[in-house]
């Protein structure tokens, strides 16, 4: 099978070479198609750090093992990972965060959790606006198909990897629609997996619990931003950023890597730890169905750690037996192929498991336009504005709000009013987009500065807007 590989920058080439030696020795039977990404490509003028010729190889292979790269200093460069994620629709980011006590010191000996982060939506659509001088907006976008894909992936991952529980983190007590949808979809899909325990935590208390007692968590699925933050925290508290791999999964393409960077100061010295990239490569083997090979390498690697064969970054005079370089570490793993750890828990990957179809159910809800929120610059007080709005048929002014707080008809004197007001108009009769355009024209003729508007739509009688 053909695999696209990038040797990357800094310590990248050394750790990639070590990983490929281990993969070959374990009989992975892969053909490596090299692609150029990283510092040299950035400096040659490619803003996303990828050689245009690489796309065809990536497309043909469908699987990409990537060593860390160096992003050159200075602005104007686009993240290679974000570019690849967007191009290939890599909707899931999977990051196992495991502590290897007693082989490697950690504050959390029992930690063995996997963060499943939604990778395409949420605030990462990058849509930001400045409607008034002092107001900045970012759009948080959550879709039902996006939630269904990632939540189902989390449960399928649990089944495939012998995990017992899937936890969902959202902030749906505040973000009732966006995070509310994520939570709702989680509850729906959880029912399809009765053998897997499920639970939901509001992200703040959930994150506190995860950092206090990570051993109580198994698989945790969450929207993009929370996943970005918590996956770094989880990897850090496992005590082993250098020992963590990550996978970015799409329907037709997947990318595997270490979570650490290119550590340029350690480059070319045969000291770097290849474990993070190796764990990425093991996830890749599971993904392409080579589960026996993945299991053999993973267990040999655990045995190596357990035997105290450590690179400098995890070397500890009391726990380690010998301090080795990158090449020697790879040789130690190869010599242990076929062995299992005895103190650390051996891994087992179920054979030939393939993910279920991730497609979503089409919506059949009845839509009805019931009003509009109009955003205007604050040029007068809310009371003064409201007085002018008596004859805007077929609408009636329902309320005026600023920064999420109502400032008309009822407001508290303490409310801090910003320079952007949201005027909510509800329709008295059936309305169309033309009625909204007429309303906007009328407001403009009253010398109001309109900065935007959002239609208020009911879906099967239920409001599709926050109330
Ligand atoms: P880094 O992860 O490269 O290194 C931080 C420190 O961690 C290093 O100085 C080193 O002491 C240690 N370290 C990291 N990996 C190690 C390993 N495998 N073995 C032994 N020690 C290891 O982070 P950084 O120094 O902030 O970033 C260096 C470069 O890497 C930057 O250009 C950054 O943009 C890039 N980066 C790339 C990726 C990626 O390609 N996915 C991810 C993160 C950072």
Image (tube, helix red, strand yellow):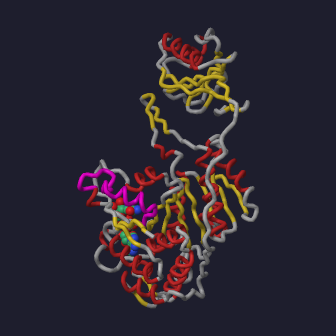
Residue 37 placed where, x, y %? 32, 60
Q: Is residue 43 magenta?
A: yes
On screen, 130 above or below 362? above
Q: Please give the range of residues in magenta.
A: 42-65
Left or right: residue 121 compared with residue 370: left
* Residue that appears at 64% across and 42% down: 174
Residue 281 in sight in this render = yes
* Residue that appears at 58% across and 22% down: 423
Q: Quadrant of residue 263?
A: bottom left
Quarter that holds the N terminus: bottom left
- Residue 23 or residue 433, whichever sits in front: 23
Left or right: residue 461 compared with residue 335: right
Residue 419 placed where, x, y %? 49, 26
Residue 378 placed where, x, y %? 50, 22
On screen, 149 above or below 286? above
On screen, 201 above or below 8? above
Q: Ligand 1 appears in which quadrant?
A: bottom left
Residue 26 placed where, x, y %? 47, 82
């Amino acid at each position: 099978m053909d695999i696209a590989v990038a040797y990357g920058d800094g310590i990248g080439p050394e750790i990639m070479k070590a990983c490929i030696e281990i993969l070959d020795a374990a009989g992975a039977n892969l053909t490596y198609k090299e692609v150029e990404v990283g510092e040299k490509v950035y400096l040659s003028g490619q803003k996303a750090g990828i050689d245009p010729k690489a796309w065809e190889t990536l497309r043909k292979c469908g699987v990409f093992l990537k060593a860390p790269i160096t992003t050159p200093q200075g602005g104007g460069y686009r993240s290679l990972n974000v570019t690849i994620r967007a191009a290939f629709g890599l909707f899931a980011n999977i990051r196992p965060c495991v502590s290897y006590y007693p082989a490697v010191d950690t504050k959390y000996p029992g930690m063995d959790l996997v963060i499943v982060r939604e990778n395409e939506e949420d605030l990462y659509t990058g849509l930001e606006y400045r409607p008034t001088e002092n107001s900045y907006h970012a759009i948080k976008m959550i879709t039902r198909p996006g939630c269904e894909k990632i939540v189902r992936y989390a449960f399928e991952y649990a089944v495939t990897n012998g995990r017992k529980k899937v936890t969902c983190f959202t902030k749906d007590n505040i973000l009732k629609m966006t995070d509310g949808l994520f939570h709702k979809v989680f509850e729906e899909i959880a029912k399809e997996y009765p053998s897997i325990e499920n639970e939901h935590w509001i992200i703040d208390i959930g994150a506190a619990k995860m950092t206090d007692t990570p051993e109580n968590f198994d698989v945790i699925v969450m929207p993009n931003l929370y996943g970005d933050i918590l996956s770094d925290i989880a990897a850090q508290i496992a005590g082993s950023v250098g020992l963590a791999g990550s996978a970015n999964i799409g329907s037709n393409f997947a990318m595997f890597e270490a979570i650490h960077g290119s550590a340029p100061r350690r480059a070319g010295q045969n000291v770097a730890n290849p474990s993070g990239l190796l764990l990425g490569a093991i996830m890749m083997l599971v993904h392409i169905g080579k589960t026996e090979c993945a299991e053999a390498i993973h267990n040999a690697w655990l045995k190596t750690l357990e035997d105290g064969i450590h690179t400098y970054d995890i070397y500890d005079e009391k726990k380690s037996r010998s301090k080795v370089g990158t090449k020697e570490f790879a040789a130690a793993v190869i010599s242990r192929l076929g062995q299992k750890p005895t103190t650390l828990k051996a891994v087992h990957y179920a054979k030939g498991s393939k993910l279920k179809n991730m497609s979503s159910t089409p919506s059949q809800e009845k839509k009805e336009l019931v009003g509009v929120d109009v955003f205007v610059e604050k040029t007068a007080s809310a009371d003064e504005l409201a007085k002018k709005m008596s004859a805007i048929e077929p609408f009636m002014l329902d309320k005026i709000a600023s920064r999420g707080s109502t400032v008309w008809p009822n407001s508290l004197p303490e409310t801090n009013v910003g320079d952007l007001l949201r005027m909510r108009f509800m329709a008295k009769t059936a309305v169309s987009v033309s009625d909204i355009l007429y309303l906007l024209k009328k407001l403009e003729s009253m010398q109001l500065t309109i900065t935007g508007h959002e239609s208020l739509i009911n879906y099967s009688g239920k409001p599709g807007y926050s109330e």
